[in-house]
Amino acid sequence: MEPLVARLRRREWRLTAQRRVIAEVLTGEHVHLTADEVFERARALLPEVSRATVYNTLNELVGMGELAEMPHADGRKRYDPNVGDRHHHLVCVDCGRILDVRADEPRLPADQQHGFELLGVEVTFRARCPDCASVPADVS
């Protein structure tokens, strides 16, 4: 996957110091951060970045199609920079960890489409990660 910063440079998007740091924070495999997490990490690299700049930049990147906005079970949106590769998500129901996974695309039979025009599919596999599965259940 091409890093977000590289994609933005290719698009000739104006990369201020704040935008660059935000894009750098959203680089890597299995990145699914909340806006607050992006802010905290960006601020650690560039203390003068503001919360408003982070939120505005995230919204702009979603609008450009460079980030995908994901709802999460904890009620907070997560931002996924992996928009170029088709993938699904594997989510730990205990700790909330999210990983990208590649799996065969599910198919919806024509007789079950009810006349809808299909635009895409999103699959979330809910599971327990190895760390959470190794913790004994609380027996109170």
Image (cartoon, rainbow, N blue to C red):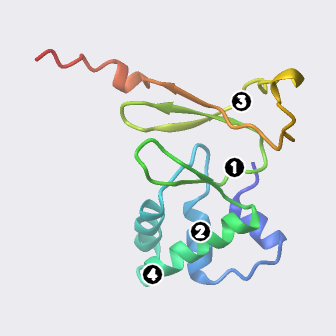
Q: Nearer the viewer, mark 1 or mark 2?
A: 2
Which residue is labeled 3 in the image? 102
User: Residue 58 — which label?
Assistant: 2
Q: CA distance from mark 4 to mark 3?
A: 35 Å
Residue at x 27%, y 20% (from the top left corner)? 135
Q: Nearer the viewer, mark 2 or mark 4?
A: 2
Residue at x 76%, y 78% (from the top left corner)? 13
First in sequence, mark 1 or 2: give its number. 2
Q: Above or below — where is 7 with respect to 83?
A: below
First in sequence, mark 2 or 4: give its number. 4
- Which amino acid, by three-letter code, is at mark 1? Asn
Q: Looking at the figure, which quarter contains the C terminus?
A: top left
Q: Nearer the viewer, residue 79 or 3?
A: 79
Q: Toward which corner of the image does residue 108 lie, by quadrant?
A: top right
Residue at x 51%, y 54% (from the top left corner)? 77
In the picture, measured across the screen, residue 16 lies left or right of residue 138, that is right
User: Are circles 1 and 2 on residues that touch, CB within 8 Å?
Assistant: no
Q: Above or below — where is 20 with respect to 95?
A: below
Q: CA distance from mark 1 to mark 3?
A: 12 Å
Q: CA distance from mark 2 to mark 3?
A: 25 Å
- Which amino acid, by three-letter code, is at mark 2? Leu
Which residue is labeled 4 in the image? 50
Which residue is labeled 1 in the image? 82
User: Which x, y percent locates residue 10?
Assistant: 83, 70
Q: Nearer the viewer, residue 44 or 74?
A: 74
| Circle 4 residues within 10 Å: few <14, some 14–19, many ≥20 | some
Q: SS class of the residue under badge 4?
A: loop
Q: SS class of the residue under badge 1?
A: loop
